Image (tube, rainbow, N blue to C red):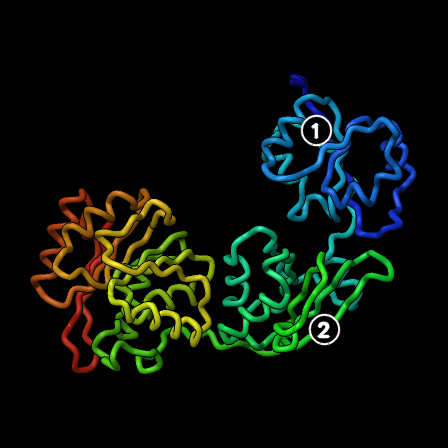
Amino acid sequence: MYKSMQTFYIIGISDNRNQFLSPEIRNLVSQGKVFSGGKRHHELVHAYLPEDAVWIDITVPLDTVFSRYEEHPEIIVFASGDPLFFGFANTVMRKLPSAKIILFPTFNSLQMLAHRILLPYQEMQTLSLTGRPWDAFDSALIRGDKLIGVLTDREKTPATIAARMLEYGYDNYRMTVGEALGNGEEESVRTFSLEEASQSAFRFPNCLILQRNKVHPRPFGIPESEFHLLNGRNRMITKMPVRLLTLSMLTLREKKSFWDIGFCTGSVSIEAKLQFPELKVTAFEQRTEGKELMERNSRKFGTPGITTVMGDFLETELGGLPAPDAVFIGGHGGKMIEILQKIKEVLLPDGVIVFNSVSEESKALFTKGITQINKKVTQCTRIAVDAFNPIEIMRAE
């Protein structure tokens, strides 16, 4: 194992088969001994490497790669584009914070795509779906970002991305896809409607830029009549004024993970996701009809990314879910005490719990349960909507 500080020379390259390396980089490479990169990078630069070069493939698991790095004081790494743009330099800094890094970046693929279509890109929201979940992409859609640049992979292709957008009603963008950028005659740049893109095939590697052509509605306070309802019963949904006051008491702007227990139509979860797109929303419901209702309402109001968990909350395994720092109890089935005890096991420090009480009995039950988990009710607001019974919105922390 090499004990002293290691040095990494990280060189950004394009996909051009006739790779251009500056005199400075060629001189560095000619004197190097240990090199690393993906298999594709090796194909592009192998002609420049010394005959006795040692090559370390960057493959998963990365821990194995870094174990091999430990044997060498200096390593020259080839990476795509700008190594700091969702690139390997970030990985080196995270795993080896004491290492010395010398960068030789080039344009990343989204910059190249913007150059090809003469698009000023200073306002572009960039994100990567390469081996990553949809979260950042969904947030950009809900926010309605004007320009969205996306790095893709072999599963989250331009076609699957376009199909997801259309599923949730985001037909207000046009998509430009760049394939094999920087690779001479193999390079392709095409612009599509989302419908066209969803039915097209694309060569890999590729990336895309979405340009908004109209504003997608993003309501603040959705009338309950707009939701698909459980058996058409408008009493089985949190009314809009109550819903907005509930979200206010949850202080979701400063939260990361929100649980909606007993979501029914999904109105609270959907309103929360619309107003706080980066929020991780997990919704629980034991009525089987709830799953379809959440799916239909999420598509109608454009809120991808809500995780639904079906079944009795008290019997649900919570270990694999993001721990909440905000919880709304929309239904308890007479088991309030047990639900609060289970919430206590996972609620993050400084987390809040909000409950809408419709009777003195449920108010007393919530207060008793909150006391038993060593919290206290800090806010209680009474509100009446139209001819419905008054509701008390209670916040505990």
What residue sits 83% from the left and 56% below the top?
183
As drawn, the label of residue 326 is: none
**Vertical placement of residue 120 versus 55, above or below:** below
- In the rendered structure, the answer to whether residue 320 lies left or right of residue 238 reads right
- In the rendered structure, the answer to whether residue 318 lies left or right of residue 216 reads left
- In the rendered structure, the answer to whether residue 335 lies left or right of residue 84 reads left
- Nearest the eye: 2 or 119: 2
Say which quarter of the image contains residue 388.
Answer: bottom left
What residue sits 10% from the left and 66% below the top?
359
Q: Position of residue 38 (x, y in %)?
A: 72, 42
Task: Name the element at disc 2.
Answer: strand
Q: Position of residue 290 (x, y in %)?
A: 30, 69
- Nearest the eye: 151 or 126: 151
Please report whichever mark, 1 or 2, sits nearer to the chain's N-terminal start.
1
Disc 2 packing (10 Å; few <14; some 14–19; many ≥20): some
**Vertical placement of residue 211 versus 157, above or below:** below
Q: Which residue is mark 1?
A: 100
- Nearest the eye: 15 or 361: 15
Say which quarter of the image contains residue 29.
Answer: top right
> Residue flagged by tag 2: what amino acid is it?
Thr
Q: Position of residue 264 (x, y in %)?
A: 27, 69
Quadrant of the image containing the N terminus: top right
* Residue furthest left as drawn: 361
Q: Position of residue 178 (x, y in %)?
A: 74, 63
* Residue furthest right as drawn: 23
Q: Which residue is mark 2?
A: 191
Q: Marks 1/2: CA distance? A: 41 Å
What residue sits 28% from the left and 71% below the top?
289
Which of discs 1 and 2 lies nearer the camera? The answer is 2
Disc 1 packing (10 Å; few <14; some 14–19; many ≥20): some
